[in-house]
Image (cartoon, helix red, strand yellow):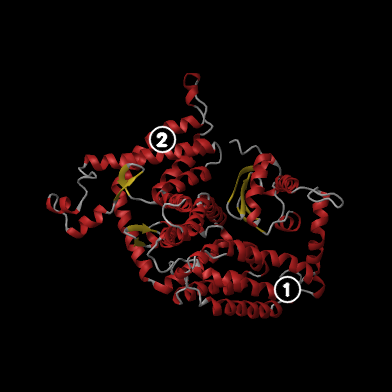
Amino acid sequence: MEKTKNNTLTKITGIFQYFAGALMVPIIILVVCGILMGFASPFVNYIFTKGTMAYSIAYFFMSIAQMIMSNLPLWFLVGLSVGIAKKNKGYAALAGVFMFMAFNLVISKNAELAGFTAQTVNVEHLVNDLGYLEADAIIYTKLFKSVLGVYTYDMSIFSSIICGLTAGMAMNKWGDIKLPNLFEFFQGPKFVILLIPLFAVVFGTLSYYLWPMADRALTALSVYISNSGLFGTFIYGVLNRALLPFGIHHLIANPLLYTDLGGTMIVDGIEYAGIRNIENALIGSPTATSCLVRNLTNGRLPQNFGAFPGAALAMYQAAKPENRKKVAAILVPAVFTAAFVGITEPIEFTILLASPALFYLVHVPLSGLGMVLAEACGVALQGFALVFMIPNLLQPQKMHAMALVWMIPLFFALYYFIFKWAIVKFDLKTPGRETNKEIRLNSKREYQESIGLKKADTKETKTEDVSALATAIIEAFGGETNIQTLENCFSRLRVTVKDTALVKEPEYWVDQLEAIGTMQNGNAYQIIYGPKVANLAAAVKEKLNMNNS
């Protein structure tokens, strides 16, 4: 019985991890949106004169950012369809868009049959002709919006989730189906396209009746989150870091960042929903006097610039003197990665692998504290890493960061002294404190040379390095025939295998294959590689002929 429960829990966790990974696929477009808005809007609003060529170019880029914000469901739809599908990803994207348009059309037609159209959904008609209470009429009118030309429910990315999951899962189940010769044209992925109208009618009709109730529940939850103040911010900060090792922390963040759950705000006469959209709107506004304070990322600034350098210094000083140079070679890039691009998994997994207690009892609550202090002190900046903070220089009047002058040193000191004490007191095996770890560090280059990743006397190109590492990764997973699916998010390689017994041990990945850490949940693996994972995943897929699927 206990084994059955564990297997069930493993499967459920694996599903959430897979969904969380797929949910990260479209995030790159939203990152582009923030960069474009941050760089272009100051030139449009303050610097360039309207009518000049320079103004026009900046205005084009700013308009692209606004277009991204206006069509958020579309990006999540395509990203989820492709991310969920394990094969035929091009057809999955087509099926997702088809499903999305048909799904919204079915909702629209259900409303039309009930007498609700763009002309009749207004407070005056609902109150005078249909007997709605004014408060209920206002709520009902807010349910609707024009989505890609269709007057339908405004479900934000929840409609994307329904349609993307449907398209991706259908492709996984029926994407290889074989049909009799008479219907051979419709076999394989085309069969899924054939099924989309059926799914659209079923899910669209169900959503027409169920979404108003779901909308009210989500509104109530949004109000609760908004009213929770600093306590809610602390809980978010704690959960966001606590779920990081399981790869599902995005499930907590994304609903707040991209839906009404994160609140709404009217900026320059337009209502924006979700923390990230509100933040980008304020950055692009010529009248706004501040960036968003409660953006749930400002609290990462004292972590990235203070806490992680403090923890790294503690680990460096706690290492054996003869190992410190090698330890610095590991920790300095990890700290730089956190500060420059905001990818913190290298340093965080170093902490986690050395001591789960240090991670969960010290780092996690202090992460929540950082969120609280940043919000309480009114810190308002765009970005939480150097590369994303450059646009702040163009709109200094919107930036409020003086509190960071004392917060960053505070977190540096907290992490340094707590980590130094804990490492020495409890003899935690952080890098450089064990003799056998020195052998591992010394042998890394030797192993790379032995499998062709590096050559002692000749120069290799970066492409050759990645190609050889990709080959070694395939072998470490038990060979091509043992790999069922392979995807990646910002920093992790996500792979499912047939037989876990054929997969190398975690130590092998870290010691020999340049991984920062590993996670296993049943037959699902997450191998943490940091920023280089995208190129690495592409190389592995090419060798597995997955890029053409």
Location of the N terminus (image quadrant)? bottom right
Q: Which residue is rendered at x = 56% and y = 56% of the image?
A: 6
**Number of residue marks:** 2
Residue topped by disc 2: 196
Q: Which mark is residue 68?
A: none
Element carrying mark 1: helix
Is 430 on the left or on the right of 241, as rendered?
right
Location of the C terminus (image quadrant)? top right
Is 514 on the left or on the right of 120, as rendered?
right
Q: Are marks 2 and 1 in contact (CB under 8 Å)?
A: no
The residue nearer to you, when weighing 460 against 112, is 460
Quarter residue 312 falls in = bottom right
Residue topped by disc 1: 316
Element carrying mark 2: helix
The residue nearer to you, when weighing 51 against 364, is 51
- Residue 524 visible to an observer of this rendering: no
Q: Which residue is rendered at x = 20% and y = 60% of the image?
A: 135
Residue 293 vs 62, above or below: the answer is below
Quarter residue 447 falls in = bottom right
View extreme (right): residue: 457
Residue 318 vs 129, above or below: the answer is below
Residue 539 vs 492, above or below: the answer is above
Q: Position of residue 98 (x, y in %)?
A: 41, 37
Badge 2: residue crowd in 10 Å (few <14, some 14–19, many ≥20):
many
Per the model, the C-alpha gap separating discs 2 and 1 is 57 Å
Inspect the image, locate mark 2, and give the three-letter code of the amino acid beneath it. Answer: Ile
Q: Position of residue 187 (x, y in %)?
A: 50, 27
The residue nearer to you, when weighing 401 against 501, is 401
Q: Which residue is rendered at x = 46% and y = 33% of the image?
A: 192
Is 479 on the left or on the right of 36, as rendered?
right
Q: Position of residue 224 (x, y in %)?
A: 35, 67
| Closer mark to the observer between disc 2 and disc 1 | 1
